[in-house]
Image (spheres, grey):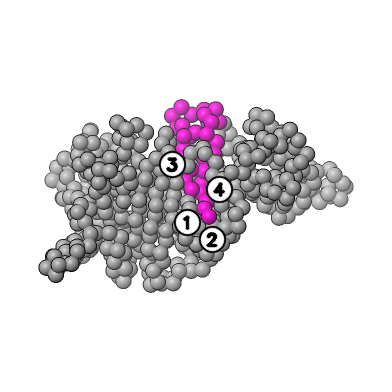
Amino acid sequence: MSKPNRRRIVQGLAATTLLAATGEARAQRREGRPETPFGFADVERRAQDLAKVAHDPRVPALPAPIAKLDYDAWRDIRFKPDKAFLGEGSPFRLQLFHLGFLYTRPVTVNLVRGGVATPIPYQSSLYDMGRTKLDKALPVDLGFAGLRIHAPLNKPNLLDELVVFLGASYYRFLGRDQLYGLSARGLAVNVEGQGGPEEFPVFREFWVGAPEKADDALTLYALLDSPSLTGAYQFTVTPGDETSVAVRATLIPRVDLATVGLAPLTSMFFIGENDRRHADDYRPELHDSDGLQIAAGSGEWLWRPLHNPRDRRISSFIDRDPKGFGLMQRDRTFETYQDLEASYDRRPGYFVEPDSPWGEGAVMLMELPTDTETNDNVVACWRPANPYPAGTPVPLSYRVRAVGGAPLHPGGRVINTFSVAPVASGTTKAEEAKGGLTRRFLVDFAGGDLDYYRADPSRVEVVASTSTGHITHSSVTPNPHIRGLRAALDVTLEAPGQATDLRVFLRTSGRALTETWVYPWTAR
């Protein structure tokens, strides 16, 4: 008897599900009951069954020609557009990524037509191999690396890439006139690496529903697997100016989940106006996202500019029932980046909005040091305060939007963050003896009612606070270049190495005019 391997297990589960669905449909017809089409409940049952057995970490060995593919050879394998699925009158097209290079974990992709799910067999004829030479006799159960969906996003007569699922539980999607930047994930586990390495759940199987001709959205399902849990996911993708992905999920913990991150986002920040540590480049700024936006459960809006820190930095924003959070690319001016190829000014932000209360927890932001723009070094997610017990299903529902330059809230928002190098405070001999360091921060706010108050900024109050140290000066000045106001504050810390968290917003007559700028500073 041959030894069981992961591919046979995956295929056995798929076959069992399909046979069970077919058998149930036949029984329904015999008994005169309406047939139940394939849907989210079927994926939930798969996740529940999978959670009852131990996680199998093994990845099946790929045929030698595929296992040896480098990046260029893998990129040379192109799916033939005329072989795309879902083309029968639908505005959507499905293409499949070939295995190879970094993508060596096979996934099964099914089409759902008439309520029946059918696996798509591997065929080399689906691809233009280019200069890459592969054995034509590759098995039909080889599987795929991932999938992507095309749709007439920017023009009615042109199919553009809309959404991609490729690698672990990563996915990316675009709104109108946007280019890929940051990524979303199905789930994060132990992203901070507490007591062990980060765990990367994977989508091991997909089901793509064949839409009708008049449908303006596409629904697909995914089965998540990981040592700590399994999960059933439903993604409903609606293209538009701000393409949205409605996510419905049920998590089945194998163990007590204490370090889970919901709706995780991953991005890159290398150089920005507020962080010029790696500034030997003709391009003034290099980042896929420049800030973390939070819509707190209290109604307050927060803006936290991103950094490329010297050491790993983790920030937690404790909240209850947040209204949303996301990694944004707020600066959308070409002159800010001067990059004709990467076009950082067209990268989207992703904003997550829960459909139901998420309870107590925190928006967690992790920033890692990087010396290149090719590394994703920023992660944001929601961290529940209480662990999810093993074996207890966890339902989730939220939406992720691909945000462009439009404001998310009606008040004033942060446009720029600048600061000057720390200098000896020199205020008093006592402070000099302490080695006090002072840094001046300049925060530009625009939007909302701020243009109205430019004529008389004396009516606007700078509300500033610091967790340690003290604020020695604050002021507000009109900034006609952004039709807003510039707030300035001097912050003094006692000694190098001391850290503080700053908060600033503008108000008038007790009414907040802007979001709250949140910023960490370590004296050096």
Q: Residue at x 21, y 56 (%)?
A: 115
Report the magenta residues as a range.
323-351
- Residue hosting label 4: 293
Between the C-alphas of marks 2 and 3, the distance is 24 Å
Quadrant hosting residue 2 = bottom left
Residue 509 visible? The answer is yes
Q: Residue at x 22, y 33 (%)?
A: 130
Q: Earlier in the sequence, mark 1 or mark 4?
A: 4
Between the C-alphas of marks 1 and 4, the distance is 14 Å
User: In x, y percent, where is residue 153?
Assistant: 35, 36
**Of the residues shown, which amino acid type is indicated by label 1?**
Pro
Q: Earlier in the sequence, mark 2 or mark 4?
A: 4
Horizontal arrangement in the rendering, residue 100 relative to residue 318 (left or right) = left
- Residue hosting label 2: 321
Q: Nearer the viewer, residue 70 or 301?
A: 301
Between the C-alphas of marks 1 and 3, the distance is 17 Å
Between the C-alphas of marks 2 and 1, the distance is 8 Å
